[in-house]
Image (tube, grey):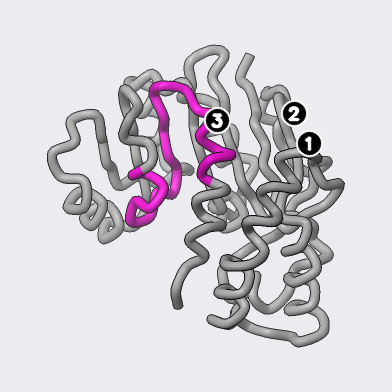
Amino acid sequence: MRSAEKYFAWQSRLVRKELGRRVLEVGCGVGNFTGTLLDRDAVIAVDSEPECIQRLKRRYAGRENLHALVCDVLSPEFRDLARFRPDTCVCLNVLEHIEDDGAALQSMASVLVPGGAIVLIVPAFQALYGPIDKNLGHHRRYNRGAVRRLAGRAGLRIRKAHYSNFIGFFGWWTNSHILKREAQSERQIQVFDRYLVPLLSSVERVARPPFGQSLLAVLERP
């Protein structure tokens, strides 16, 4: 299934604005977002799947500022990543896959330099949870209150938290509760990416919506 390329580019621009020069990417997969970070001083890309890291290394071979490692965010070895002195940890659509999300957030915070930040994108609103979420391995969806509570337990401050993709909110709810879909269709993705993403990016650049399909949060380590 073709990915929503314009949506990925839009979300990537939102995230990049929040990043420092030494970025730790948790759950990098095969490196789609990693490639947008290679202008940084250092990129530490980690994933629990060895095959993903192997593919990422082949994809970006020769990049001296890239450190690609097999590592789980909840493993004791993750704390050793503090040696890279990351000023930002980015975790995009990954936290919802981790059963103990509080422990994962604490682990990320532990490796940051003082004043560093964790940048998250997570699916928003538990009311939208449906078969697609279950099949994707999502344990939950989030609102700002849930992220605020997680941040507090991890000793982090909220620098920013806002929803995005307000049109997607209605589409996801329809898929979950009316159509009972177990996966998004190719046609849905094509229409959303071609016609709706340009409108969304323009509107949400001017005004932040009070709800949305996703939540972007920036959490700061004191």
Instruction: Give the alpha-carbon distance from disc 2 to disc 1, as whole Å.
Output: 5 Å
Say which label, 3 or 2, has the lower sequence index: 3
Establish if 68 lies above or below 175.
Answer: above
Query: Hey, what amino acid is under mark 1?
Result: Arg
Residue 157, horizontal then vertical, whole percent: 71, 22
Asked whether residue 83 is drawn in magenta, I would say no
Say which label, 3 or 1, has the lower sequence index: 3
Select label 3 or label 1 by which is in front.
Answer: 3
168 or 69, nearer to the observer = 168
Instruction: Give the alpha-carbon distance from disc 3 to disc 2, as whole Å.
Output: 24 Å
Query: Hey, what amino acid is under mark 2?
Result: Gly
Q: Which residue does the image show at 40% across and 35% down from the upper left?
A: 78
Left or right: where 133 falls relative to 42: right
Dot 3 falls on a residue whose secondary structure is: loop
Residue 46, horizontal then vertical, whole percent: 36, 43
Tell me if label 2 and label 1 are in contact, CB under 8 Å.
Answer: yes
User: Dot 3, how many residues are within 10 Å of its Cα: few (below 14), some (14-19), or many (20+)?
Assistant: few
Dot 1 falls on a residue whose secondary structure is: helix
Left or right: where 70 falls relative to 214: left
- Seen as rendered, the residue at the extreme left is 62
Q: Which residue is mark 3?
A: 17
Establish if 156 lies above or below 113.
Answer: below
Question: What is the number of the mark on residue 149?
Answer: 1
Q: Which residue is mark 2?
A: 152
114 or 166, nearer to the observer = 166
Residue 90, horizontal then vertical, whole percent: 50, 37
Quarter occupied by residue 139: bottom right
Residue 190, horizontal then vertical, whole percent: 55, 74
